[in-house]
Image: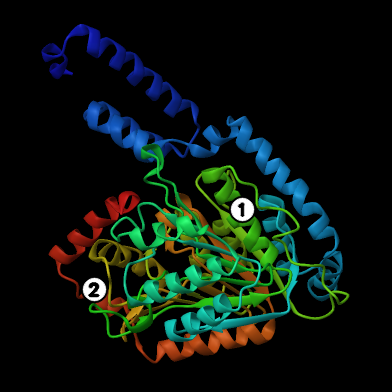
């Protein structure tokens, strides 16, 4: 640390104490040895820069969050508030166990429930939207018809003709007396002006930005949620901007997947919105006023559903584990879509194990990237997948942004979680799991349509990559934690 000689002792001595504290904390966190060693080397070789990166990107927020008593008390209150909701939906759980008892689907559901406390409920209806035109046309109509409240949460909210149209609808509804709350990710939406949204505040619209503190800038809120009147919910891959409808200037097409649900499962989306809203505003909106009314049937009708969510603060990484369970326990086939592929080692090995056991594992990502670095890094993972028998497809008709999984023609998951290290370990994500053969069939047919617009990667193709290309791809893989 030769640089210490140029710094007054009264500056470097406190820094040295802080550095030693961080090193001790890092060791005591009992992470994977590779992670601990990587951060330790960074702190040793570039102490000042390493310290900055550690505080921005390296801290164990699951452990830190456990020490925030106010947040733990609130989360306990969330669970208590949801108990009556799940109690009145107990018939859906009984139906689920009658259909899936003793199967891996039951184990999958039980694991998700234990990890994040959201149980099986029903959707009166679930509709899958593979195009932005379908999704936003339907969303506009639902927003116009809102009577009591609108809760909106997006990672990216741009500033263009689509957001202008939606903002006008929110304005009109607010003037009509509808409660409107709007939450956006600070960094994800930072590139676009928010004056039009802020102009709604005097009309009674409540607008908040999520994850805005410097300490949390590396840990984004990547979820997309809309809840209308406690009756209608939306989630999936689409952010909000005209490019998500027509591809914009960069892409011939934007291929994504979103889902619209009605009924009891809307309450689980509302619970996730409520937790983030409370974290930023301290306003509690997890009350019966914002949850679905009790179902009129006995749980025998509708689509069995369950939301699973995770964030960097959660100890279980529930969405990632759900994917691992579904992939690892599928008996016939498991088909996955994600725009990016920089997998966590456990999930990567699970895919390989499933393929080696004879399961039809197919993975599709975009072949027309929006970001070159993660696209190049993904190629370094293909060889082992292909050798194990996984079919890897690159979608080339535009940009593929879907985050989906189907298993054995029985279940399908649609949501916000990418198959990359940031989504799997750092971001706030959610997936809506639907235990329904018709919806699984629908999603599999969409996957097959996408294959027709894709290029299948082969081992021969990988062998023909130049040494320069292979080195570039491998180097980009090293940067994957910060992409």
Above or below — where is 31 with respect to 244?
A: above
Quadrant of the image occupied by residue 333: bottom right
Q: Is residue 422 visible?
A: yes
Q: Residue at x 18, y 60 (%)?
A: 472
Q: Is residue 86 left or right of residue 66?
A: right
- Residue where numbered disc 1 is placed: 274
Q: Is residue 476 left or right of residue 253?
A: left
Quarter of the image containing the C terminus? bottom left
Q: Is residue 313 visible?
A: no
Quadrant of the image occupied by residue 7: top left
Which coloring applies here? rainbow
**Disc 2, disc 1: CB below 8 Å?**
no
Residue 158 drawn at (x, y percent): 34, 66
Above or below — where is 478 with respect to 371?
A: above
Above or below — where is 445 with respect to 291?
A: below
Q: Residue at x 54, y 67 (%)?
A: 175
Quarter of the image containing the N terminus? top left
**Does dot 2 land on a helix, a strand or a loop?**
helix
Mark 2 burial class by Cα count in 10 Å: few <14, some 14-19, many 20+: few
Q: Residue at x 66, y 87 (%)?
A: 438
Q: Residue at x 43, y 29 (%)?
A: 26
**Does dot 1 land on a helix, a strand or a loop?**
helix
Residue 447 drawn at (x, y percent): 48, 85
Quadrant of the image occupied by residue 50: top left
- Give whichever of 328, 156 is nearer the camera: 156
Residue 268 drawn at (x, y percent): 67, 61
Residue 61 drawn at (x, y percent): 49, 38
- Give whichever of 429, 29 is nearer the camera: 429
- Residue where numbered disc 2 is placed: 463
N-term-proximal mark, 2 vs 1: 1
State how far apart marks 2 and 1 are (Cα): 50 Å
Q: Is residue 318 left or right of residue 95?
A: left
């Amino acid at each position: 640390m030769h640089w210490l000689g140029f710094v007054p002792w009264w500056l470097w001595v406190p820094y040295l104490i802080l550095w030693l504290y961080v090193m001790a904390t890092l060791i005591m966190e009992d992470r994977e040895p590779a992670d601990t060693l990587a951060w330790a080397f960074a702190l040793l070789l570039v102490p000042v820069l390493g310290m900055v990166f550690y505080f921005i990107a390296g801290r164990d927020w699951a452990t830190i969050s456990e020490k925030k008593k106010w947040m733990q008390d609130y989360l306990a209150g969330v669970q208590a508030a949801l108990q009556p909701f799940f109690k009145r939906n107990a018939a859906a759980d009984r139906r689920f166990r009658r259909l899936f008892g003793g199967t891996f689907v039951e184990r999958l559901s039980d694991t998700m429930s234990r990890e994040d406390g959201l149980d099986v409920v029903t959707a009166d209806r679930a509709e899958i939207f593979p195009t932005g035109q379908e999704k936003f046309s339907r969303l506009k109509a639902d927003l116009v018809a809102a009577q009591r409240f609108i809760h909106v949460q997006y990672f990216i909210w741009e500033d263009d003709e689509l957001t202008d149209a939606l903002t006008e609808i929110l304005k009109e509804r607010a003037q009509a007396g509808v409660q409107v709350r709007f939450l956006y990710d600070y960094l994800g939406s930072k590139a676009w002006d928010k004056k039009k949204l802020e102009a709604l505040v005097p009309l009674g619209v409540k607008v908040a930005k999520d994850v805005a503190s410097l300490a949390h800038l590396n840990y984004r809120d990547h979820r997309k949620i809309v809840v209308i009147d406690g009756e209608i919910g939306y989630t999936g891959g689409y952010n909000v901007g005209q490019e998500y409808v027509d591809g914009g200037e960069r892409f011939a097409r934007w291929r994504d997947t979103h889902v619209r649900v009605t009924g009891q499962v809307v309450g689980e989306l509302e619970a996730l919105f409520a937790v983030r809203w409370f974290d930023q505003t301290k306003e509690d909106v997890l009350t019966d006023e914002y949850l679905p009314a009790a179902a009129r049937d006995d749980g025998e009708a509708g689509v069995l559903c369950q939301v699973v969510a995770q964030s960097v603060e959660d100890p279980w990484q529930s969405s990632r584990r759900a994917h691992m369970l579904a992939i690892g326990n599928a008996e016939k086939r498991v088909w996955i879509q994600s725009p990016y592929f920089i997998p966590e080692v456990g999930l990567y090995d699970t895919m390989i194990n499933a393929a080696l056991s004879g399961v039809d594992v197919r993975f599709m990502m975009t072949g027309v990237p929006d970001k070159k670095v993660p696209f190049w890094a993904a190629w370094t993972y293909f060889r082992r997948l292909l050798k194990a028998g996984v079919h890897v497809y690159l979608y080339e008709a535009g940009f593929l942004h879907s985050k989906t999984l189907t298993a054995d023609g029985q279940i399908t998951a649609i949501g916000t979680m990418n198959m990359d290290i940031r989504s799997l370990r750092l971001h706030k994500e959610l997936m809506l799991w639907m235990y329904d053969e018709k919806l699984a069939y629908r999603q599999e047919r969409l996957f097959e349509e996408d294959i027709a617009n894709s290029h299948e990667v082969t081992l021969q193709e990988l062998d023909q990559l130049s040494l320069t290309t292979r080195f570039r791809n491998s180097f980009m893989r090293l940067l994957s934690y910060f992409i």
